[in-house]
Image (tube, grey):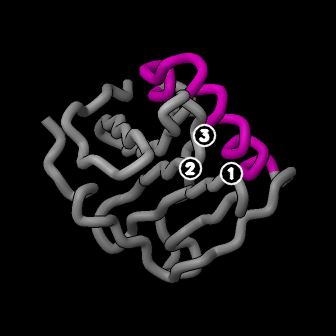
């Protein structure tokens, strides 16, 4: 089950949050009023890491998906892990991912390989 990691790096005008378990990392960007403007759901390991990335203005992307064949996204496992997210966040994150996995939402592949930002490489406690 996803658990929140405290102490993420600060970003001007945004509150960043990080949730982690053995299979997924979920990174969120929220406005001071709590509106989620972007999220990343990372899965896979090392060079096979992928990320479903949603941005409120640009839509959904599947970063790393155009690289070598790699792990498929396990929706059932993610939905189980997502029970650890606050309900509002869980609903915001699950909707576009479910629509994408079910083929009802298109997602472009922006980057051949997903790369975490430096602040996202901190070891999870």
- The answer to whether residue 93 is above or below residue 40 is above
- The Cα atoms of the two marked residues, 1 and 3, are separated by 21 Å
Q: Position of residue 55 (x, y in %)?
A: 63, 55
Mark 2 or mark 3, which has the lower sequence index? 2
Task: Report the side of 61 relative to 72 (left or right).
Answer: right
Q: Secondary structure at mark 2?
A: strand
State which quadrant residue 54 falls in.
Answer: bottom right
Eyeballing the image, is 4 above or below 97? above
Q: Residue at x 60, y 21 (%)?
A: 88
Q: Where residue 116 appears, x then y in whole percent? A: 33, 65
**Closest to the observer, 78 or 5:** 5
For label 3, the crowd category at 10 Å Cα-Cα, with few meaning under 14, some 14 to 19 and many 20 or more, is some
What mark, if any, has residue 56 been given in the picture?
1
| Depth check, front residue: 36 or 48 | 36
**Viewer-side label of 1, 3:** 1
> Looking at the picture, how far across and down is residue 78, in whole percent?
52, 36
Are there few (<14), some (14-19), or many (20+) residues within 10 Å of tag 1?
A: few
100 displayed left or right of 14: right
Q: Which residue is mark 2?
A: 38
> Is disc 1 in contact with disc 2, using a CB cutoff of under 8 Å?
yes
Secondary structure of the residue carrying tag 1 is loop
62 or 31: which is nearer to us? Answer: 31
Q: In which quadrant will I find the N terminus?
A: top left
Pointer 1 or 2: first along the chain:
2
Q: Residue at x 37, y 28 (%)?
A: 2
Q: CA distance from mark 1 to mark 2?
A: 6 Å
**Residue carrying label 3:** 75
Query: Start and end of the magenta stretch?
Result: 81-102
Residue 89 is a magenta residue: yes
């Amino acid at each position: 089950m996803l658990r929140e990691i405290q102490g993420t790096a600060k970003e001007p005008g945004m509150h960043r949050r990080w949730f982690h378990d053995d299979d997924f990392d979920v990174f969120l960007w929220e406005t001071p009023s709590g509106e989620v403007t972007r999220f990343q759901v990372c899965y896979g390991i090392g060079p096979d890491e992928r990320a479903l990335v949603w941005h409120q203005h640009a839509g959904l992307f599947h970063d790393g998906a155009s690289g070598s064949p790699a792990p498929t996204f396990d929706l059932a496992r993610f939905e189980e892990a997502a029970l650890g997210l606050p309900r509002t966040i869980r609903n915001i994150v699950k909707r576009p991912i479910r629509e994408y996995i079910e083929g009802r939402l298109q997602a472009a592949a922006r980057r051949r390989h997903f790369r975490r930002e430096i602040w996202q490489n901190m070891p999870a406690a």
